[in-house]
């Protein structure tokens, strides 16, 4: 598989899943074209609902569908899927112990020209506070298809951050993934880079290559599931390398970095650095420019790796 839009993989996987499970439905808030689900509506017009520009109602409708035995996948921009619908998702879906699959598209800087109002740097932090909710972010088309299938079969609510744009595959077609279990991409002995998402996982891989050229052996872990965190894997590599760097397209104070730090503070205090958004708002720009501005780059990961090793 070459470069492919993640939203196209999202749609194709849902179409394929619905062949065998007629409970699956798509619920949208006037963003089917943006979410890539027009194809699903074409194949299953009676299983696709567009509620219009009414995101909280989208979650309410999805909760009702779930209560009636359906498996609704409700998608909208990540800023709306988190900040705007939070109470409905918390109470109507999660507190009620239903089975709603909420999808937040264009996470973090991938919102680009939609700007700061549409740039969710805090959605993981909000969602982490909901008991028992599974939170994940695929890094490429292969992991997306696999993790999406597992989300559909999981009994309970999930929140997925979905990068919509085209992404080169990181993994081979037959790679296996498990919700709640991180994926070791490269092994290493000197420092561990724990990354998430379609922007930072490739940067982590590049950082490991740059570090290798400087004689530093870096392990790279794709921690696609933030909650539940794969604590066993984090602990294993904290003990092995003694240095952890997290990398995410999100506020470090509420995202992957905070989760890893909170766990290690109790289990195995370890030198850490966090690459991500440092208590800032979003803004308008190209994704490449935003990536440089917020230092979500391989070069920043390398810089932090060198610094953390010199302070050990």
Image: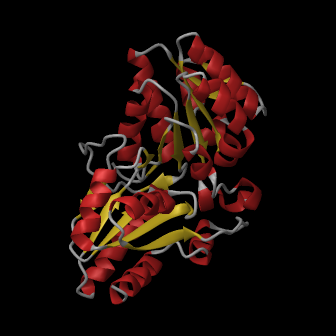
Q: Is residue 262 above or below residue 1?
A: below
Q: Going by the image, does 22 lie left or right of 46?
A: left
Image quadrant where one finds the C terminus: bottom left
Where's residue 116, x and y in %? 74, 61
> Which is more toward the observer, 33 or 259?
259
Where's residue 275, x and y in %? 49, 71
Q: Going by the image, does 53 lie left or right of 298?
A: right
Q: Going by the image, does 308 lie left or right of 73?
A: left
Residue at image position (48%, 74%) is: 297
Number of marks drawn: 0
Q: Is residue 22 above or below residue 5?
A: above
Residue at image position (33%, 52%) is: 231
Residue at image position (68%, 20%) is: 61
> Which is more toward the observer, 233 or 112?
233
Where's residue 150, x and y in %? 38, 32
Decide if residue 201 is in sight here. Answer: no
Decide if residue 143 is in sight here. Answer: yes
- Name the residue at the top extreme: 68
Where's residue 24, x and y in %? 50, 19
- Name the residue at the right extreme: 53
Asked which quadrant contains residue 205, the reply is bottom left
- Name the residue at the front extreme: 266
Q: Is residue 14 above or below residue 146?
A: above
**Which colour assignment does the render follow?**
secondary structure
């Amino acid at each position: 598989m070459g470069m492919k839009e993640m939203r196209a993989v999202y749609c194709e996987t849902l179409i394929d899943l619905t062949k065998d499970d007629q409970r699956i439905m798509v619920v949208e808030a006037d963003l089917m074209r943006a979410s890539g689900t027009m194809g699903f509506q074409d194949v299953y017009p009676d299983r696709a609902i567009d509620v219009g520009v009414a995101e909280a109602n989208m979650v309410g409708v999805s909760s009702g569908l779930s209560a009636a035995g359906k498996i609704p996948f409700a998608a909208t921009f990540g800023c709306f899927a988190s900040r705007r619908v939070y109470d409905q998702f918390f109470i109507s879906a999660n507190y009620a112990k239903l089975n709603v699959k909420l999808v937040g598209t264009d996470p973090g800087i991938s919102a680009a020209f939609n700007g700061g109002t549409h740039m969710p740097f805090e959605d993981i932090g909000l969602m982490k506070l909901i008991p028992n909710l599974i939170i994940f972010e695929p890094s490429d088309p292969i992991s997306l298809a696999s993790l999406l299938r597992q989300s559909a079969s999981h009994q309970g609510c999930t929140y997925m951050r979905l990068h919509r744009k085209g992404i080169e595959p990181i993994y081979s077609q037959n790679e296996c993934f498990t919700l709640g279990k991180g994926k070791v991409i490269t092994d290493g002995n000197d420092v561990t880079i724990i990354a998430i998402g379609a922007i930072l996982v490739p940067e982590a891989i590049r950082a490991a290559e740059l570090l290798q050229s400087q004689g530093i052996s870096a392990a790279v872990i794709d921690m696609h599931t933030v909650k539940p965190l794969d604590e066993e894997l984090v602990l294993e590599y904290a003990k092995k390398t003694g240095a952890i760097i997290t990398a995410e397209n999100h506020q470090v104070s509420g995202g992957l970095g905070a989760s890893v730090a909170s766990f290690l503070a109790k289990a195995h205090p370890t030198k850490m650095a966090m690459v991500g958004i440092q208590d800032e708002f979003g803004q308008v720009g190209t994704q490449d420019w935003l990536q440089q501005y917020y230092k979500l780059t391989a070069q920043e990961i390398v810089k932090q790796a060198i610094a953390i090793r010199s302070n050990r």
